[in-house]
Amino acid sequence: MSIEAKFKKLGTDNAPGQELRQSDTGLLAVMRGDPLPGRPVDFSHGDVDAHAPTPGSFELFSAGVALGGAQAYTEYRGDFGIRELLAPRLADFTGAPVDAVDGLIITPGTQGALFLALAATVMRGDKVAIVQPDYFANRKLVEFFEGQIVPVQLDYVHAAETRAGLDLTGLEDAFKAGARVFLFSNPNNPAGVVYSPDEIGQIAGLAAKYGAIVIADQLYSRLRFSGVRYTHLRAQAIDAENVVTIMGPSKTESLSGYRLGVAFGSRAIISRMEKLQAIVSLRATGYSQAVLRSWFAEPAGWLEDRIGKHQAIRDDLLTVLRGTEGVFARTPQAGSYLFPRLPKLSVAPADFIKLLRLQAGVIVTAGTEFSPHTPDSVRLNFSQDHQAAVAAGERIAELIERYRA
C-alpha cells in the first residue's frame, strides 16, 4: 500500500466535526422548499456550553498553571500524585484493582488512549475483531496499523432491551479465525446500548479461552440512565494482563476541552503505550492533568442531576423522532448518543445529511462512519441545550417529511 492510499482510507470529510468540508455540488437540483428557521445545532459533538463543567475544574487547572514546571513536565505516563489519587477511585468504580505505578497512564483524551492501545497491540497483518456499528475511529485505527479487520455484528435493532445484541457466535468465529485483539465500546457508540452481564461474561470467557487481548472503551460508563445495569469487563474472570480499559471525563463532566483520558490494566501494554506516548506527544497536557483531581469527586448529587438532565433531553428527542412515520430509534441506555434509522427518502442519505445542514441548520453524523451496514442511520449527540435540541429534532422530522420517498 502506498502512503497516499494509506492516508486516503483515513478520510475525514464525513467524520464528526468535519461536515463543512463536504461538497454541496449538485444539491440545488434536488433541494425542496425554503430553509427552516431555528437555532443551529451541531449534533456531531456535545455542547460544552449547555452543561457546566465539573465544579472546581477550572480552579484546579489554574492551580496547575500556578505550579509551573512541576505540573507542566510530568512523567510521560502522567503525574504520579494524580495517578495515585485516581487508582482507588477507578478500582472502586470498575470492581478490580488498579496499579497506579505500572498499570495506569494519562493520555491526551480517550482518542489518544485508543491510538496508543492499538499501536501497542497490533502489528501488520494481525487480525483484530471490531464491532459493527461502533466508534468511527476503531476501523480507521486498525487499518492505519495495517491490521486485518474481522467484523462482529451488533444487532441492536432486534435484540431484547436487556441486551446490546452482540453476535457472540461471530465473536468466537473471529477468535477461531486468528483474531487476538478485540476492541469494543460499552456503552456502544453510536447506539447507546449497554452490554448485558451475560454478554460481558461471555466476552470474558471467550477472550480467556483464546488468549485474546480486549480493549474496552468505557468512556460513557458513568452516564447510565435509570434502571440500567452495567458490568465491567475487567472485574470478570479474565487475565488482568489481557485487558485495557479506557475512560475519561468528557460529555458526562463537560470537560472535553481539557483533552483528558486514562487507560488502565495490563502493565505490559501500559508500558508500551508510555514508550509510544513519549515520542508522539510526550505526555497529556500537564496543566490539564490537574483537572483530573475533580474526577469521581464531584459534589453529592451532581452526577445524578447531570444524568437526569441528559435523560430528559433523550426522552423528548425520542418522542419527536418516533412521532415521524418510518423512523426507528432504540432507547439509549447510557451515553449521549441517539442512532435513529431514517425511512426511505427521495434523496440519498448522504445528501439528506447535507440538506439538514443547509436547510435546517442541523448537523448530524452519517451512519456509515460507524458501519458500512448502517447507511440509513445518523448519529446525534444529545448532550445539548434541551430546548434547542428538541427544536432541531422537530426540524429533522419536518425535513424527513419534505424529502420522503
Image (cartoon, grey):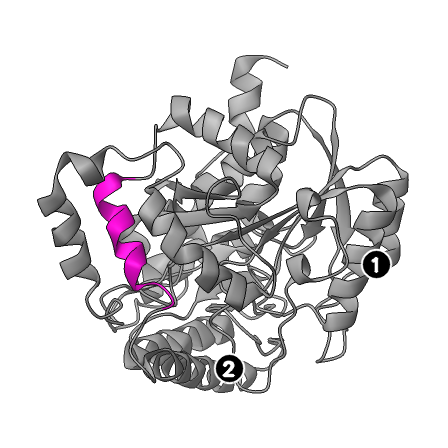
Q: Residue 327 at x, y = what percent?
A: 60, 76
From this viewpoint, is residue 15 visible? Answer: no
Label tally = 2
Residue sitting farthest toward the left:
66
* Residue 291 forms part of the magenta stretch: yes
Q: Is residue 145 magenta?
A: no
**Circle 2 residue:** 318
Q: Quadrant of the N terminus?
A: top right
Q: Nearer the viewer, residue 180 or 100?
A: 100
Quick one: 165 or 25, which is closer to the camera? 165
- Looking at the image, which residue is at 33% across and 57% down? 358
- In the image, which is nearer the foreground, mark 1 or mark 2? 1
Label 1: element kind: helix
Q: Quadrant of residue 164?
A: bottom right
> For mark 1, does the 10 Å Cα neighbourhood hold few (<14), some (14 to 19), or many (20 or more) residues?
some
Q: Earlier in the sequence, mark 1 or mark 2?
A: 1
Q: Circle 1 is placed at which residue position?
A: 168
Q: Is residue 283 above or below residue 238?
A: above
Badge 2 element: helix
At a point 13% along the width and 43% down the height, the residue shown is: 67
Residue at 62% across, 73% down: 230
> What are the residue bounds of the magenta stretch?
285-296
Looking at the image, residue 98 sits to the left or right of residue 292; the answer is right
Under mark 2, the amino acid is Leu
